[in-house]
Image (cartoon, rainbow, N blue to C red):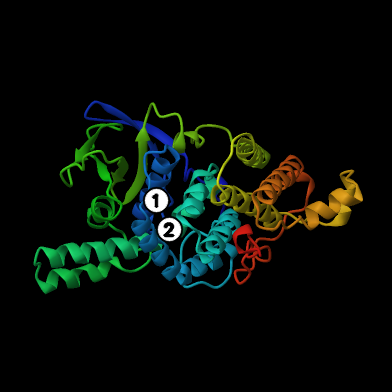
Amino acid sequence: MTTLKETTNVKKLRNILCEGVEYTEISAIGDGNCGLNAFVMGLINLIQLGELNLHEDTYAALLEALNNSLPTLKERLNLYKGLPSKIEGNAYTDLAAPLSVFIHFIKSKPSLREFEVYLNEAKTREQVAAISVGMAPALRLLGENTFRQRLVTVGAPREHLADLDHLTGDGVEMGHELSAQLAYDFFKLNLTVLNDVKKDASTYAQVKLSEPLVNAPTLVMIHRPGHWNAGILANQKQGLAELPHSEESKKEDTLSLSATSKNLRELAENLLKSPTSLPNLESVASHSERVVNQMKEEIEINAESLRRLGLKPEQIKLILNPLSPTQSTDAALAFALQNAEIAGFLSAHYHSFAKKPVSSSINTEKVSHETSLRHRK
């Protein structure tokens, strides 16, 4: 058993130079799916930068693959919780809660807009890591299927199709085959792969995999012998550039939680200032509920612990049993603002609450946001 905090995974590493361009390397979890984990991190980065907009048909296929991979994710969740699992590897106990939230989110069949909001709000190491390991099995399925379709299209011999079987198992190392198909054929992205050429510690060579797509964003992956990491431009300020550097001192949990609740309030207040459609507001309201639910999965919250913090009975009741609005614009906005206040309070007093044991804090059979706004009547 270990924790993400005890590793340098999902942190900025060294800067490397390739053909006159400087990149920052970002470490991916090495669970056998490191190439897929790095690819997902690249997708998160492009979406947070506003450079990638998924098409509805692409997202429909992605969501289907995500749901088909849920059995694999439950096994990985068991591993992280210290329970019997068919999957071997590092048991990151602090990823159990965010991975559970991701599983519940996918089970709810989110809309494309909700999915993009979810990825946009992944700002902590734990959130990015959970999404990476959560999406990796689905991308393996999609990459293999896309590769098979490409081989069939060009009339490849049957034995070449049979050779793909070695790519199908979770944790099996992938190469350029899957990443190229995922980028160019499925997501319609350009892919830059930087390979270690061992001239010195910071010089890499770019591998050309295909002719570049016009007006398409570029996802960067960095390949070391036996491992893949993600890459971003060294002068980038947003997206994955907001992750901590491996040489920085560790931050308190309250900092990331406080930032999340502050961002949540800003989202709700921006919607209050300008007219918006109900679907967009529903996305923010649903996201606000996920933030609060994740905090409640990690800490013991009861009336007595809230009384000790000086809360009045009506305030305690609000935190333990938040209001559930009807489906209207005003109610959705009130719901988002209410949850922003709850998230802000819980983050400010995070260390005052007892932490739930990892093995009992998550019930994989209970959808934490099954009462989300878009399902309320």
Which is nearer the eye, 331 or 351? 331
Up the image or down, 70 lies above or below 118; here it is below
Which is nearer the eye, 226 or 283? 283
Q: Which residue is pictured at 76% across the width and 55% down the height?
A: 322
Residue 343 location, quadrant: top right
Within 10 Å of the Cα at label 1, are there few (<14), some (14-19), or many (20+) other Cα atoms? Answer: many
Q: Name the side, left or right, on which 340 lies relative to 245.
A: right
Q: Name the residue under label 1.
A: 40
Q: Name the side, left or right, on which 329 lies relative to 88.
A: right
Which is nearer the eye, 337 or 74? 337
Q: Which of marks 1 and 2 is nearer the N terminus?
A: 1
Up the image or down, 10 lies above or below 153; here it is above
Give the Cα distance between marks 1 and 2: 7 Å
Q: Which mark is residue 255?
A: none
Q: Name the side, left or right, on which 85 lies relative to 146.
A: right
Q: Mark 2 points at which residue?
A: 135
CB-based contact (under 8 Å), mark 1 and mark 2:
yes
Across and down, in percent, residue 165 comes to 25, 71
Which is nearer the eye, 238 or 168? 238
